[in-house]
């Protein structure tokens, strides 16, 4: 089993509300369809989720009528993006089925409370390709919560123990500093918990409601614990995601659990 997350900044224009990147979605769908192994696909929410979720402070939960309405709108928006991804995958020849987190997952103050993995297990056993995504889900403590695709990567890695878990980002991997701001930033070949101290994490970008880069990297350490290997690669470079999933050596960062 292979596990992949298509980052929201690869499948959407992150700063333009509800703007997909159809060419990237199509190309990545083709790359994934060319693989011979069973696959689980997660994608980020990008501009279909983060902009409104941040504007309405949905990560704080709450259930005022206006927050509820915003939560419902974001749920509808991320499903719209998922529809684009699933349709592209089906066109490329994968039998992709959407599994919305809001229907199978509930959180307790941001942590997993219950998750029904049955649809993932049963569709995968019938050789479908389950597709899930960052979403707004029930939260027994907060009312609702924003759930990152990264959390789904972890839960799926825990249950399926994939041979490889690959994160497709809009940069080559994890750098010693933000490569978009610092020219001297160096790509890390491998990163483990002990390397965190040499990374200069900038403040999380204003529209990213699912937490800091450091938090995301810490989650990847947990994922690495349940996968044969865990990699961050550039999803904007043709065939890099495909080659990483095939186990070829590519430019990127290997995430290791470390001692
Ligand atoms: O893009 C975020 O998921 P992510 C989900 O995987 C929402 O972090 C609704 C903003």
Image: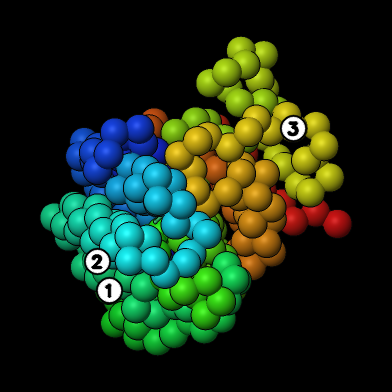
The residue indicated by pointer 2 is: 96
Residue in front for this viewpoint, 70 or 245: 70
Q: Residues within 10 Å of mark 1 (few under 14, many from 20)?
A: some
Q: Nearer the viewer's eye, disc 3 or disc 2?
A: 3
Q: Secondary structure at mark 2?
A: strand
Q: Are marks 3 and 2 in contact (CB under 8 Å)?
A: no
- Image spot of residue 188 (x, y percent): 68, 32
Marking on residue 128? 1
Distance (Cα) linking label 1 and label 2:
6 Å
132 relative to 179 in the view: left or right? left
Residue in front for this viewpoint, 32 or 97: 97
Q: Residues within 10 Å of mark 2 (few under 14, many from 20)?
A: many
Residue situated furthest top in the rendering:
183
Q: Nearer the viewer's eye, disc 3 or disc 1?
A: 3
**Is 42 situated above or below 180?**
below
Residue situated furthest left in the rendering:
91
Q: Secondary structure at mark 3?
A: loop
For marks 3 and 2, the one nearer the N-term is 2
Distance (Cα) linking label 3 and label 1:
39 Å
Marking on residue 150? none
Tell me if residue 111 can be seen: yes
Point 66% across, 20% down: residue: 185
- Image spot of residue 3 (x, y percent): 46, 61
**Is 165 situated above or below 200?**
below
Figure quadrant of residue 154: bottom right
């Amino acid at each position: 089993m292979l596990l992949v997350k298509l980052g929201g900044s690869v499948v959407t224009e992150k700063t333009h509300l509800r703007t997909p990147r159809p060419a990237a979605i199509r190309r990545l769908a083709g790359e994934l369809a060319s693989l011979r192994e069973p696959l689980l696909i997660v994608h980020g929410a990008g501009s279909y989720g983060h902009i409104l979720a941040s504007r309405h402070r949905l990560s704080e939960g709450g259930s005022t009528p206006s927050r509820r309405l915003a939560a419902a709108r974001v749920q509808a928006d991320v499903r719209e993006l998922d529809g684009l991804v699933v349709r592209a995958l089906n066109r490329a020849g994968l039998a992709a089925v959407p599994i919305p987190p809001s229907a199978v997952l509930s959180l307790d103050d941001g942590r997993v409370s219950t998750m029904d993995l049955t649809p993932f297990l049963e569709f995968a056993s019938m050789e479908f390709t389950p597709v899930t995504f960052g979403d707004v889900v029930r939260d027994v403590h907060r009312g609702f919560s924003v759930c990152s695709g990264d959390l789904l990567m972890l839960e799926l890695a825990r249950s399926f123990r994939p041979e490889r878990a690959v994160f497709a980002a809009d940069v080559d991997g994890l750098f010693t500093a933000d490569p978009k701001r610092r020219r001297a930033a160096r790509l890390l070949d491998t990163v483990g918990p002990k390397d965190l101290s040499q990374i200069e994490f900038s403040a999380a970008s204003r529209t990213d409601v699912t937490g800091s880069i450091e938090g995301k990297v810490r989650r990847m350490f947990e994922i690495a614990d349940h996968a044969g290997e865990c990699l961050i690669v550039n999803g904007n470079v043709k065939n890099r995601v495909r080659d990483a999933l095939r186990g070829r050596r590519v430019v990127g960062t290997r995430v290791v659990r470390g001692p």
